[in-house]
Amino acid sequence: MKECAADICRANGCQIIHITGKKDYEGLRTEYARLKIPSRLFDFCHTMAQVYAVTDAAIARAGAVTVSELALFNIPSVLIPYRFAGGHQKQNALALTRTGLAEIIDENDLNKERLLEKVSRALKNDPSRMTDIEQLRKTFFADSDKRLADSIEALVK
């Protein structure tokens, strides 16, 4: 990300909000300042709804919670499934790509040029990326309360 952040900002006139994790926070904060990247960095964030409210596009892994939040907030995304997650992040990402809201970059294929191209496309009002809201609702929200209750009941029987 640090290799691409300055180019993303220059090409798209935007700022970066980066949730770094505790281990990478200081190094990235220093590097972003040195490169004069317009950014807000956090080692952790307890108020993701506030972050999503000001987000035009996201670059993220594809954990179930992240993908669900991106769908809920209708955030165009570039998803990079974690390759050591047993394949489930890839499946999560595919669910969001079917709605037109996300694109996937396989971690093995990740490079600066590909990331910049996909982020720039996500930030533009590209008709080929328009979200199918009905598909989104069917994929992520259709009777989820009933499905959860059924799963819990099956476990306690």
Image (cartoon, rainbow, N blue to C red):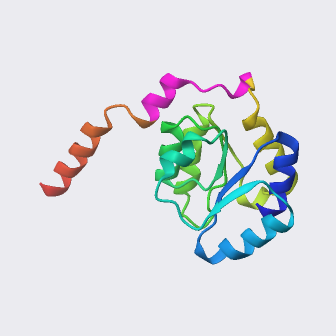
Is 122 within the magenta? no
Is 137 within the magenta? yes
Please tell me which residue is depicted at 80% across the width and 40% down the height of the picture: 120
Please tell me which residue is depicted at 60% across the width and 41% down the height of the picture: 54
Classify residue 32 by image quadrant.
Answer: bottom right
User: Viewed as shown, does residue 113 lie left or right of 74?
Assistant: right
Percent across and percent down for residue 124 are 76, 31
Classify residue 61 by image quadrant.
Answer: bottom right
User: Viewed as shown, does residue 113 lie left or right of 109?
Assistant: right
Which image quadrant: the N terminus?
bottom right
Percent across and percent down for residue 156 are 14, 56
User: Viewed as shown, does residue 121 lie left or right of 48?
Assistant: right
Tell which residue pokes out farthest to the left in this image: 157
Span colored in magenta: 127-139
Percent across and percent down for residue 62 are 57, 53
Residue closest to the eye, 59 or 63: 59
Please tell me which residue is depicted at 44% across the width and 37% down the height of the picture: 140
Please tell me which residue is depicted at 84% across the width and 60% down the height of the picture: 36
- Above or below residue 66? Residue 97 is above
Total labels: the figure holds 0
Residue closest to the eye, 36 or 140: 36
- Above or below residue 70? Residue 86 is below
| Dominant secondary structure of the residues highlighted in magenta in the image | helix
Residue closest to the eye, 40 or 96: 40
Which image quadrant: the C terminus?
bottom left
